[in-house]
Image (spheres, rainbow, N blue to C red):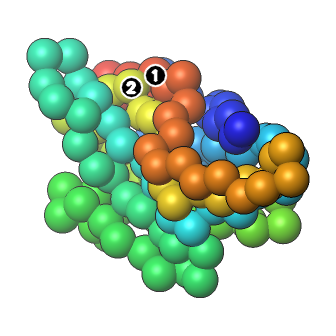
């Protein structure tokens, strides 16, 4: 199986920056798409950004120009650099791995939508 562990959340003032990291662990696996989602209190979880193993990125309109997603395939880690933060960015941020392939018990297995435990980002006004 594959596990995701996020880090880097915290409290920051409006206009500040934070960098989130998400490390995937397991044995003999590959991940096609990694991404970040967020969920604010009382709202549904929403896409923030995704990146494929080939480096293709996709962003929510609300974060374009402010957030940058990147990925280190050798370390199985995805990052989210968040600049010019706004109070409306306050949420729990979740790392996601989609289209996961892992080798176990002499065969390949496939997973979709593996989630991390989430990390809180709070932007004060």
Q: Quadrant of residue 24?
A: top right
Total marks in image: 2
121 lies left or right of 58: right
> Looking at this view, is 8 or 124 the one in front?
8
Q: Residue at x 61, y 74 (%)?
A: 53
Determine contact: label 2, label 1, CB under 8 Å: yes
Q: Quadrant of residue 9?
A: top right
Q: Residue at x 70, y 40 (%)?
A: 2
122 lies left or right of 73: left
Circle 2 Cα neighbour tier, 10 Å, few/some/many (<14 / 14–19 / ≥20): some
Q: What is the secondary structure assignment of the residue under circle 2?
A: strand
Q: Give x and y (percent) for residue 83.
A: 43, 53
Q: What is the secondary structure assignment of the residue under circle 1?
A: strand
96 lies left or right of 79: left
82 lies left or right of 54: left
* Residue at far front of view: 106
Q: Residue at x 65, y 43 (%)?
A: 22
- Mark on residue 120? 1
Q: Give x and y (percent) for residue 91.
A: 32, 27
Sequence-first disc among 2 and 1: 2
**Looking at the image, can residue 48 be seen?**
yes
**Looking at the image, can residue 81 be seen?**
no
> Looking at this view, is 47 or 104 the one in front?
104
**Does residue 18 sit above or below 48 in this rendering?**
above
Q: Give x and y (percent) for residue 104.
A: 82, 47
Q: Give x and y (percent) for residue 117.
A: 54, 23
Circle 1 Cα neighbour tier, 10 Å, few/some/many (<14 / 14–19 / ≥20): some
Q: On the image, numbered disc 2 is attached to which residue?
A: 92
> Looking at this view, is 58 or 24 the one in front?
24
Q: Quadrant of the C terminus?
A: top left
Q: Residue at x 54, y 48 (%)?
A: 111
């Amino acid at each position: 199986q594959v596990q995701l562990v996020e880090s880097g959340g915290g409290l920051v003032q409006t206009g500040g920056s934070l960098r989130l990291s998400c490390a995937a662990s397991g044995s003999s696996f590959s991940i096609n798409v990694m991404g970040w989602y967020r969920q604010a209190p009382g709202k549904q979880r929403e896409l923030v950004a995704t990146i494929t193993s080939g480096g293709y990125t996709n962003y929510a309109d609300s974060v374009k120009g402010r957030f940058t997603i990147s990925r280190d395939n050798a370390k199985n880690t995805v990052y989210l650099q968040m600049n010019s933060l706004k109070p409306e960015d306050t949420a729990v941020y979740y790392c996601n791995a989609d289209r996961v392939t892992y080798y176990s018990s002499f065969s390949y297995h496939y997973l979709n939508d593996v989630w991390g435990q989430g990390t809180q980002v709070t932007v004060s006004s």
